[in-house]
């Protein structure tokens, strides 16, 4: 079981590029293969999910007092992930450091938006919660991801931690789908150290001055 890092007073930048890069062509090929298979319902394709949803013979988890950290259930690879070996290797990259919970491919159709919102539990400053890593797979030139009203310059194949407890929204003004891989993990000491080191190395002039 991953050990939580409880140093919640430390403040991190709201956007931090992590020292991982992945093969965009391999990810895109597998993501688009799943999209074709799920052509009617491809906006969200789940790769890791609560175990009882993957294996329906398993009992539904009992009620929990707190669902924020994902410990209310066991998590299991879905058949979508089992047929996607490269995406599985990407997820395994993080499994060696900590517990990986929910993993999804998120598609945003052309001329679509994700309205501004916050995710109250997805931030390093929140005690006993998950954080979300984002790996862009397909970003056309007209994709804009705004965090606190400023664009996050994510490139395909990169891996970013974003403080999603802050306001964020997405606009796709292009002619192709935006595809992101999102990986929800437990921020244990090892992961926090990786993020902290990346936080230190990032050029502060690229961080919006008004953001904490």
Image (cartoon, grey):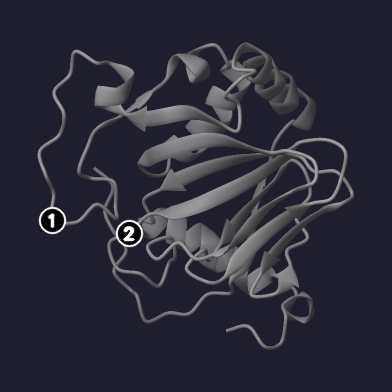
Q: Position of residue 60 (x, y in %)?
A: 16, 29
Asked if residue 156 is positioned above or below residue 91 in the image, the reply reads below
Helix, strand or loop at label 2? It is loop
Report the side of 115 relative to 146 (left or right).
left
Q: Quadrant of the C terminus?
A: bottom right
Report the side of 88 relative to 140 (left or right).
left
- Going 84% across and 50% down the picture, which residue do you hit? 173
Q: Position of residue 40 (x, y in %)?
A: 61, 20
Q: Position of residue 140 (x, y in %)?
A: 85, 43
Q: CA distance from mark 2 to mark 1?
A: 13 Å
Helix, strand or loop at label 1? It is loop
Disc 2 vs disc 1: Cβ atoms closer than 8 Å? Answer: no
Q: Nearer the viewer, mark 2 or mark 1?
A: 1
Q: Residue 203 occupies which quadrant of the picture?
A: bottom right
Question: From this viewpoint, which residue is outermost toward the bottom?
Answer: 210
Q: How many marks?
A: 2
- Going 57% across and 58% down the picture, which residue do you hit? 161
Mark on residue 44? none
């Amino acid at each position: 079981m991953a050990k939580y890092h409880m140093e919640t007073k430390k403040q991190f930048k709201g956007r931090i590029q992590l020292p991982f890069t992945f093969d965009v062509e391999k990810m895109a090929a597998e993501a688009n293969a799943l999209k074709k298979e799920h052509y009617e319902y491809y906006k969200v394709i789940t790769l890791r999910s609560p175990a009882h949803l993957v294996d329906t013979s398993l009992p539904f988890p009992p009620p929990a007092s707190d669902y924020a950290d994902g410990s209310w259930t066991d998590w299991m690879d879905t058949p979508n992930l089992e047929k996607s070996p490269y995406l599985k290797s990407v997820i395994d990259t993080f499994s060696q450091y900590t517990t990986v919970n929910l993993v999804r491919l998120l598609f945003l159709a052309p001329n679509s938006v994700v309205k501004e919102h916050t995710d109250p539990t997805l931030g390093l400053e929140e005690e006993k919660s998950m954080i979300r890593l984002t790996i862009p797979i397909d970003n056309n030139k007209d994709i804009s991801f705004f965090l606190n009203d400023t664009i996050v310059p994510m490139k395909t194949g990169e891996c970013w931690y974003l403080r999603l407890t802050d306001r964020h929204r997405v606009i796709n003004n292009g002619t192709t789908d935006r595809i992101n891989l999102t990986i929800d993990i437990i921020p244990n000491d090892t992961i926090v150290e990786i993020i902290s080191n990346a936080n230190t190395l990032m050029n502060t002039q690229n961080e919006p001055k008004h953001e904490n």
